[in-house]
Image (tube, helix red, strand yellow):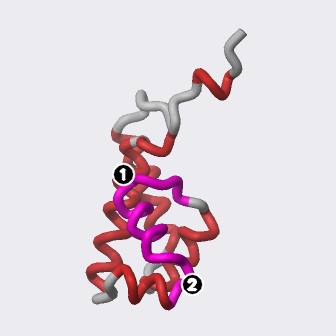
Amino acid sequence: MVSNIETMKSSLYSSHYEKLGAWLKKCREDSGLTLREAAEVSGLDHSILCKMELNQRKIEILEFVRYCRVLGVDPFAGLAVIVQSIDEDPSEPT
């Protein structure tokens, strides 16, 4: 018997997360911070932030909120990116 976990599509590579990562990257660039500068301020390793922006790592909610604060953006705006993406393509599993 195959478990539910084995049959679930990983949301890591979901286009919804891709859009969120792109939004985070744009916000960081708009803030004028490099990855290393943002990492220093956030207390997260720069490789974690890079992987979040490039959709190579799951975005944990607490790290997301912390990163948004470092960038000076509202985390709810990032969530709106996800909601809009889901609304545009509700057929893709989340």
Which residue: 36% across, 36% down? 89
Which residue does the numbered mark 2 point to in the structure image? 43
Rounded to the nearest angstrom, the CA distance separating label 2 from label 1 is 23 Å
Who is closer to the viewer here, 18 or 3?
Answer: 3
Q: Where residue 46 sits: x, y (%)?
A: 44, 76
Magenta span includes 44: yes
Q: In which quarter of the image is the N terminus?
A: top right
Tag of residue 18: 1
Q: Where residue 16 sits: x, y (%)?
A: 41, 47
Q: Earlier in the sequence, mark 2 or mark 1?
A: 1
Residue type, numbered disc 1: Glu
Q: Quadrant of residue 38?
A: bottom left
Q: Where residue 88 sits: x, y (%)?
A: 34, 40
Against 93, residue 27 (above or below) is: below
Q: Where residue 90 sits: x, y (%)?
A: 42, 33
Mark 1 burial class by Cα count in 10 Å: few <14, some 14-19, many 20+: some
Residue type, numbered disc 2: Gly
Magenta span of residues:
41-59
Which residue: 27% across, 79% down? 29
Name the element at disc 1: helix
Q: Are marks 2 and 1 in contact (CB under 8 Å)?
A: no
Magenta span includes 64: no
Which residue: 57% across, 73% down? 65
